[in-house]
Image (cartoon, rainbow, N blue to C red):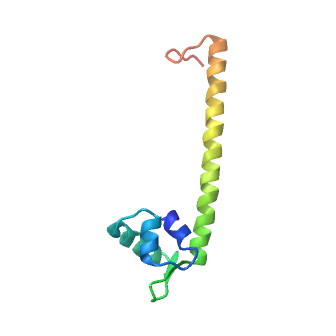
Amino acid sequence: MREVLSIASVKVCKTRIMYGANLNFLQLEKYLRALLGNALLSFDGDSGYLTTSSGNEFLQLYANYVKSFKHLREEDAKNTKVRQNLEKMCGVGKDNLQY
């Protein structure tokens, strides 16, 4: 859905969305129905689809989510390494944790 909304940031036809998002026709129809039904995408009747202001808000929220998730994953990896180092220093193995 993000890809469809990104492609439709300028007025585009259904075919351009389908190829740009690498979707087959049935997938495209499903996504268009969902996006139109949720007012994230508009259709002007001349085969032109365009992302709405709500769709642009969705794209911004999605980008923020991805950025936050990536940061959390990096922090989790750092914390895992710190925990492993602490366990080694205490002589505690993974199988016999003693806290």
Q: Residue furthest top?
A: 91
- x and y percentages locating residue 81 in the rendered image: 63, 26
Query: If the image is split into quadrants, where does the C terminus sit?
Result: top right
Q: Is residue 93 above or below residue 49?
A: above
Residue drawn at 50 percent across, 81 percent down: 42
| 38 relative position to 73: left or right | left
Q: Is residue 32 above or below residue 61?
A: below
Q: Is residue 97 above or below residue 4?
A: above
Between 4 and 20, the residue placed more toward the observer is 20
Residue drawn at 63 percent across, 14 percent down: 88
Between 89 and 39, the residue placed more toward the observer is 39
Between 77 and 83, the residue placed more toward the observer is 77
- x and y percentages locating residue 95 in the rendered image: 49, 16
Quadrant for residue 98, please give it. Answer: top right
- x and y percentages locating residue 40 in the rendered image: 52, 74
Residue drawn at 39 percent across, 64 percent down: 23
| 57 relative position to 16: left or right | right
Residue drawn at 49 percent across, 87 percent down: 44
